[in-house]
Amino acid sequence: MRLDGGGRTAAFASFNKGVPCLIHFGRSLPGTDDLASLAIATIPNVGAGQIDPFLPLTLCPLAITGWQGHPGMILQTDDGRDYLANPELADIKRDGAEGIDFMLLDRGKPDGVKLVISVRLDPDTGILQLKQTVTIPDGWSCSWLAAPTVPVSTGMNQIIDHSGRWCGEFRRQEAPFRTGAHSRESREGRTGHAHFPGVTLATPATGEHTGACLAATLAWSGGHRMLAEELPDGRRQVQFGVLDDALARAEVASPTMLLSWSGDGFNGVSRAFHGHLRAVQAPVNARRKREPRPVHYNCWEAVYFRHDLHELKSIASLAAELGAERFVLDDGWFRGRNDDTSSLGDWEIDKAKFPDGLAPLIDHVHGEGMRFGLWFEPEMVNRDSELFRSHPDYMLGPDDQPSGRNQHVLDMARPEVRAHLFGQIDAILSSHEIDYVKWDHNRPLTGGGPDQARGFMMLLSDLVLAHPGVDFESCSSGGGRIDFGVLELANRVWLSDSNDALERLRMQHEASHWIAPEVQGSHVGPRHCHTSGRVLSMPFRAWVAAQRHMGFEMDPRELTPEESQTLRRVTTWWKQNRDFLFSGALHRLESDDSEVFAEMTVDTAADRFILFAGQAGASEQIYRRPLVAAGLNPDAVYEIRLVNPEDVSPLANRRMVNTLANGGTMQFSGAFLMSHGLRLPNAVPASMTVVEGQRIEPEDQ
């Protein structure tokens, strides 16, 4: 059977009524291809010393068949013995033109194991969604159920994934396939700063615009495992699954795995994931009445826990003057919260700080033309809190466990814990005009299985349904919980707790392999960065934030008149162009310079583009290399201008050969820009060059 859509074909075959195989996923196949012949072509010949039957790599490879790699499912009977299931295909159901459900039953055991494998091919993005569910007898358990296993094509020898840390998320790393398994695991009970649940398989020649690659990600916000394995016979497989999901229950379901293939480089899979995310979030954004994403102001790095109503009003007014459209009150607003040692779990307004509640501040914020947002950390508790004193049993794990940031985790698997949290948060949201919640999670777990993550998703889902006009942001000490599971409910992520623009420049660029730019929150931080100690210029800080969902997070009272003017200028430009930036196709550009992070956004008709070229450090060469564009119409002519000529360094450009830095324009064909490239003014470290290109008609030339 086959699915076709989005310029892709996914073809499946079952041998001897066994678990189906994914025999092809990639470029569209002609309708004349014989799938039976294709299926045979995927099976190696049996060699000496091997298991006698042909061994296809199925969507759920099993040990009973003789498969020598990691199995896709591991079951235990009620007495703890491993059970080698051997399901056979019992039924196939088509779900329109886009989906197939394969139903399998244990051979000769109608009351035994039942397996359902569901596949969907998106007709717009070409993303293949795979999920499987196993039903087992009472008392049995399933210790491993991968999302359906996928084969890796010949030539895709490179494994690319992302590591990271607090204030240093999305660090790219590469490894070659070799015999054995390349394994990544998150044991934090959340996605984790170091383990974004995604992997890309590529050929050594694959670049941003050329070559084939295959990318997979798990839509799941808890502990997970990824295996990219090469068998001694040369075949390769990729598996994603939930980590340590060994609870005995009748039905176990894997999260959905999203699979994207591109023959046009890494940008091809990125655009597919961006399109998928935009489609998933369309209902959320529709509830916002299609209003543009507002410029944030977050008060955290201005006041921390020091909440004074008069001071906050003053800061809010200054933020509005700079162009902010939403004011966010961060940690410190609830009862007894003066530092990070107490009060988590007591989600009631602190009357000592806000004797008349939050209404006076909210009214002031609305009077300045801004919306109002609020910080929560619902899954956590301090021992010094009324909640802990009343319900110490709500804490997850033993009493003598270590704390993290002076706090512990609530047992989100318990319905009464979720009900208590829903009641407190719902009361705040229902009684105030709040349209945004920053949802934080500031420590890893010391115990707790996948049901902790499931409990979080249930609580967040209930709040989203109860408050459809509220935007939710996924924050977990920054980027500790970013995945396609939570992004079905939260329409923004806090990419990192670092507001260092140099760190952000790199992180945002790497995160764009998966996450659409409008979903990534990016704030203009203080002149003196609180996490790195660096001092960076306002133009650089502002333009880095303008690449994504822009915001401010500093004390506006520290700004000089020149800094304020620059920030207002960049913010005004961002407001005028955000709809374009967040609807066009993002292309990362190959700069041939490790210190340059360049990307451009092109509209659907290829009539216009915006290009950001960020210079992180000093380049090895003297002159800036031309940036080869992408996504343009080769026959069109584009008029080019610098958006920020005032930021061009006179030191690095003692003599200019064109008038771009003086506000002039130049005209080039799309063919020239996509072959020779655009040479921009030379740049000093920690600077950004922004370019706009507009297609012009022959009579305009």
Image (spheres, rainbow, N blue to C red):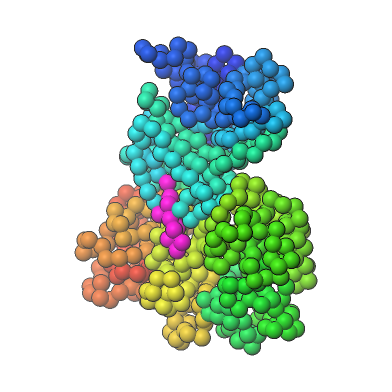
Q: Nearer the viewer, residue 128 or 584?
A: 128
Q: Name the residue at 42% across, 30% down.
A: 236
Asked if residue 625 is among those painted magenta in the image, a careful observer would answer no
Counting from the top left corner in percent of width and height, residue 55 is at: 47, 18
Quadrant the N terminus occupies? top right
Instruction: Decide: is 361 above or below 134.
Output: below
Nearest the viewer among 428 and 679 is 428
Please provide the residue range marked out in magenta. 161-171
Residue at horizontal 35%, vertical 57%? 668
Magenta-colored segment: predominant secondary structure = loop
Location of residue 326 (image quadrant): bottom right
Q: Nearer the viewer, residue 373 or 647?
A: 373
Q: Is residue 483 left or right of residue 248?
A: left
Q: Position of residue 424 (x, y in %)?
A: 75, 66
Q: Is residue 163 magenta?
A: yes
Q: Is residue 250 above or below residue 635?
A: above
Q: Is residue 585 visible?
A: no
In this rendering, position of residue 672 left or right of residue 260: left
